[in-house]
């Protein structure tokens, strides 16, 4: 989702890092302290204001590749408000800081891509709105050029997702509205429905329970449009395992299901108070069972397609017992009463209950479910070294009786490759995970996730070394940016949170409290010229009571608002 975004930002950042310290070639005006025109040896042309021999103030710079910057400069760098246009149609309009896109701005491309929001160090970071050429629109939080945090993604077909994102995909709690009127609210992982959730379908069906890989899987409850309600186990989107189905007409079945059908052992209670307990196949009574009839009779024996057939024993309400072969629900020719029976008489209480029973087809669950369009193709993980992957575990044998423990190389459903330790069928211990886009994690795992000490690197050179919890940066660690900036301190849920130290590439140093990736609380900021500010910060800017000490020792103390001293003490 974010590949083109990364490419665009890298290009712009590369263009902005050049300082423009003048050497010579002033062709018009005052290129020292005033207004003038300057042409560099590489062909770049600048028209605008100068101060101390640097580009400072308002001006226009045309680079030799055709790129044009119009806006504010400070000491030879883009700084303040400006607009940068590249020959291929990319255009950025907004704030710059120390030669880098930083602050509020808008980035557009000729293909229709548009981002409007916050930038930090040349990257999407903070709140923003992104419109894609294919019609998708995202509004929410970004971190380090990736959709990360709370937000809403709208699709061209009218569907949407609102909730939390991790690595550009839905993760955590969220709400998905589909174009056909379906609605899902619940847990997500790696862009798929995973965990607990509620799915409402346009025909009125409603499922509440566990999901795995977008499908009903685990314990749940589904209510059908015709009034049926099932509570129990599901597997791969179908009713499978132990459960209880209730029909609005009064039937109640409790027992085993396979692929949406009554199969195995179960108990059916009928509206007329009769009751069957025994074996089922393909949604009908098949095998050994006992039928208790409303009139007081009881049959125990074999059933075929719902009727007594084969060897069995019938005891009527008067206590008479008949043992022998049955066919079509009745005894086969002249059965002999067992010793102790009162007399032989025609059995009026027919063996077959005679009631209309729920059909096998009525039990089946919808076989297919909608998949997330943006999700990776579903399926079992690749099998290597003779191992079998199923239900979230690695097994040593095809019968899935023995969960694997040891070391292996294992391709996960998202395409990443894990190499390392596995315990009781789950990734646990030390290992390495390499993602298709070049990201790499090396360190400790627990419960199938990154937990403990580890190192996470990105293709652009960014790297985090430290503690992880539930797959996110959490605890103490160090995050190194590709431009040389670095943060060392506390993390929470993947963000700078707590006490830490941030060293900027231009020499600035901040030591203090962080919140949501930005300085927030009390801290100390040391500037390259030797100035030091100590005091309050909010959302990365000086806010509240503080003291600014200049290199010459001069002290200004008072109230700051958005980096400006507004009230002296």
Image (cartoon, rainbow, N blue to C red):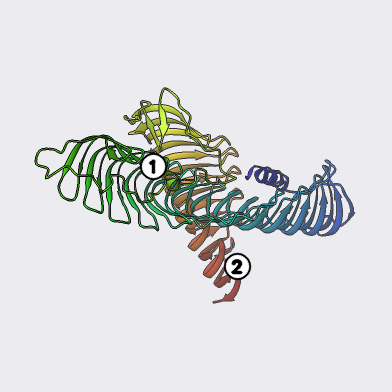
Q: Residues within 10 Å of mark 1 (few under 14, many from 20)?
A: many
Establish if 391 lies above or below 123.
Answer: above
* Residue 32 makes an appearance in the image: no
Q: Position of residue 298 (x, y in %)?
A: 22, 46
How many discs mark residues in the rendered view? 2
Q: Which residue is mark 1?
A: 283
Q: Position of residue 361 (x, y in %)?
A: 45, 45
Q: Nearer the viewer, residue 443 or 262?
A: 262
Q: Nearer the viewer, residue 12 or 493?
A: 493
Q: Identify the secondary structure beneath mark 1.
A: loop
Looking at the image, which residue sits at the far right?
28
Which quadrant of the figure has residue 15?
A: top right
Label 1 to label 2, Cα distance in Å? 70 Å
Looking at the image, which residue sits at the far left?
340
In the image, 168: left or right of 359?
right
Establish if 461 lies above or below 54.
Answer: above
Q: For the point 14% across and 44% down, which residue is it?
A: 343
Q: Nearer the viewer, residue 159 or 320?
A: 320
Q: Are marks 1 and 2 in contact (CB under 8 Å)?
A: no
Q: Identify the secondary structure beneath mark 2.
A: loop
Q: Which quarter of the rendered picture does the N terminus lie within?
A: top right
Q: Nearer the viewer, residue 291 or 425?
A: 291
Q: For the point 44% across and 48% down, which residue is it?
A: 362
Q: Position of residue 163 (x, y in %)?
A: 53, 56
Establish if 546 lies above or below 158.
Answer: below
Q: For the point 70% across and 48% down, which residue is it?
A: 134
Disc sitting over residue 562 in the figure: 2
């Amino acid at each position: 989702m974010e590949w083109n975004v990364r490419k665009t930002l890298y290009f712009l950042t590369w263009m902005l890092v050049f300082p423009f310290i003048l050497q010579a070639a002033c062709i018009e005006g005052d290129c020292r302290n005033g207004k003038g025109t300057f042409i560099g040896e590489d062909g770049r042309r600048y028209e605008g204001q100068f101060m101390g021999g640097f580009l400072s103030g308002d001006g226009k710079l045309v680079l030799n590749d055709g790129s044009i910057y119009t806006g504010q400069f400070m000491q030879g760098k883009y700084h303040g408000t400006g607009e940068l246009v590249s020959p291929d149609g990319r255009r950025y309009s907004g704030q710059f800081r120390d030669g880098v896109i930083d602050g509020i701005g808008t980035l557009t491309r000729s293909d229709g891509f548009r981002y409007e929001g916050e930038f930090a160090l040349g990257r999407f970071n903070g709140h923003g709105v992104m419109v894609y050429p294919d019609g998708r629109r995202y509004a929410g939080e970004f971190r380090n050029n990736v959709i990360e945090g709370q937000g809403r993604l709208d699709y061209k077909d009218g569907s949407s997702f609102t909730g939390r994102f991790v690595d550009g995909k839905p993760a955590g709690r969220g709400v998905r509205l589909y174009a056909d009127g379906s609605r899902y609210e619940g847990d997500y992982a790696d862009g798929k429905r995973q965990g607990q959730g509620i799915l409402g379908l346009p025909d009125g069906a409603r499922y509440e329970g566990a999901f795995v890989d977008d499908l009903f899987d685990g314990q749940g409850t589904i209510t059908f449009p015709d009034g049926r309600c099932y509570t129990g186990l599901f597997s791969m989107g179908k009713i499978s395992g132990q459960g209880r189905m209730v029909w609005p007409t009064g039937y109640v079945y409790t027992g085993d299901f396979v692929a949406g059908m009554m199969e195995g052992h179960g108990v059916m209670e009928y509206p007329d108070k009769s009751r069957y307990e025994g074996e089922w196949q393909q949604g009908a009574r098949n095998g050994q069972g006992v039928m208790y009839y409303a009139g007081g009779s009881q049959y125990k024996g074999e059933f075929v397609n719902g009727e007594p057939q084969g060897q069995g024993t019938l005891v009527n309400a008067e206590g008479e017992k008949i043992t022998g072969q049955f066919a079509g629900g009745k005894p086969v020719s002249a059965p002999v009463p067992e010793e102790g029976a009162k007399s032989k008489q025609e059995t009026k209480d027919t063996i077959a209950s005679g009631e209309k029973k729920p059909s096998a087809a009525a039990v089946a669950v919808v076989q297919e479910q909608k998949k997330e369009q943006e999700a990776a193709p579903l399926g079992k993980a690749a099998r290597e070294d003779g191992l079998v992957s199923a239900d979230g575990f690695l097994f040593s044998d095809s019968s899935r009786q023995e969960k694997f423990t040891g070391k292996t190389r294992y391709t996960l459903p998202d395409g990443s490759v894990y190499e390392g330790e596995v315990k009781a069928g789950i990734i646990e211990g030390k290992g390495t995970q390499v993602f298709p886009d070049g990201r790499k994690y090396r360190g400790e795992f627990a419960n199938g996730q990154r937990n403990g000490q580890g190192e996470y690197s990105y293709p652009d050179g960014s790297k985090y070394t430290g503690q992880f919890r539930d797959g996110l940066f959490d605890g103490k660690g160090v995050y190194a940016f590709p431009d040389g900036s670095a943060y060392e301190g506390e993390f929470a849920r993947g963000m700078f949170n707590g006490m830490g130290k941030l060293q900027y590439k231009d020499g600035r140093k901040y030591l203090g409290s962080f919140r949501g990736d930005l300085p927030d609380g009390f801290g100390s900021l040391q500037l390259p010229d030797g100035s030091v500010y100590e005091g309050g910060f909010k959302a990365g800017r000086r806010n509240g009571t503080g003291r600014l000490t200049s290199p010459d020792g001069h002290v200004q103390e008072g109230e700051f608002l958005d980096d400006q001293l507004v009230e002296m003490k």
